[in-house]
Image (spheres, rainbow, N blue to C red):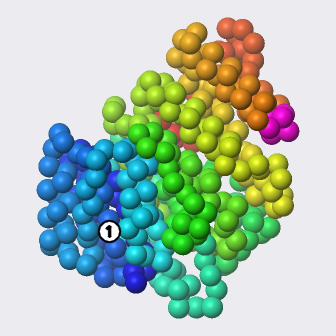
Amino acid sequence: MKLLTIVIPCYNSAAYMENCIESLLPGGDEVEILIVDDGSQKDNTAEIADRYEREYPGICRAIHQENGGHGEAVNAGLRNAAGIFFKVVDSDDWVNEQAYRQVLDTLRRFVYGKDTLDMLITNFVYEKQGAKHKKVMNYNMALPKNELFTWDDVKVFIAGQYILMHSVIYRTELLRECGLELPKHTFYVDNIFVYEPLPHVQKMYYLDVNFYRYFIGRSDQSVNEQVMIGRIDQQILVTKQMLGCHDVTKLSSRKLKHYMVRYLEIMMVISSILAIKSGSRENMEKKKELWNYVKKMNPSLYLRLRFGFLGQGMNLPGKSGRSISIAGYKIAQKFFGFN
């Protein structure tokens, strides 16, 4: 039994995957590194994965599959995971070694102690290409530090502050028990990965270390704004799956309900702003259809999303209203450091 399984989804990742893998090797025998080659054909991703399996037997394992997208690579990792805990690290990202050791120390403490840990949360750093100052996403104001806590102990998440795939390590069996399976050939499924299991999470721990380094800024990256506009259908698909996986209005925990509604709100905002910025009448129709989908599916949730602060800002009428929406989005971009 391994302490931690780390899954690295790889698709034509030869240019940077070695940096990612090397940053994870200091975990030693307690860590299982699953390098999932998701049907790469344009480079030697498959050969690199096989080489690490040969050089680090019992630690690195290469998994080769037909191309199914990021979500199917994560699914393959979850199917094959032998670790008590489960982490996804994208192939162009890496981790900080000192923080990594602190993470493993923390996980080990729970495995050999009497308490069960469902989710470990750490900070992540936006390693934005060309940026002089690195934006750190931490949770100091939102979560109790260095203690086991529940949703009732959560403080206040500020606007734009969410627990993302970069910041979360789940208990592997929890993910299996909640039936998590990400859609194939779809981008932005990391939102489903971190959102869908939340009602199953009972015990959490926040370790205030800058563990995950999230590289951002390549022109072909999935979070590049023009790329996102071109994939608006996938953004909407992910948003709809998140809307449908739980009736958040019926959750018993008030704080969990508030958090999950806010998460859905930001997903609706992203889909809406991409439609607005595209300038396409077709995409504006998709935006309208998405809001009508929520209204029909869950009228109570629709009211919360549509007339919340962000929802109102995404549905201002006319050209001037769209300009205000875009201006607000640009301010948020600058403040939070994304895209």
- As drawn, 89 above or below 187: below
Left or right: 329 as drawn, with respect to 156: left
Q: Secondary structure at mark 1?
A: strand
Task: From the viewer's side, name the closer residue of 290 and 221.
Answer: 290
Residue located at (50% from left, 33% from top): 234
Q: Quadrant of residue 204?
A: bottom right
- In the image, taking residue 183 as reference, residue 128 lies left or right, namely left
Give, as a single range, the part of the protein colored magenta: 298-304
Q: Nearer the viewer, residue 57 or 322?
A: 57
Residue type, mark 1 in image: Ile
User: Would residue 172 be visible to someone looking at this image?
Assistant: yes
- For residue 236, above or below residue 33: above
| Whole-percent x, y for residue 237 in the image | 56, 35
Q: Is residue 290 magenta?
A: no
Residue with the mark numbered 1? 33
Q: Residues within 10 Å of mark 1 (few under 14, many from 20)?
A: many
Residue 314 position within the rendered picture, expressed as x and y whole percent measured from the top left:
70, 24
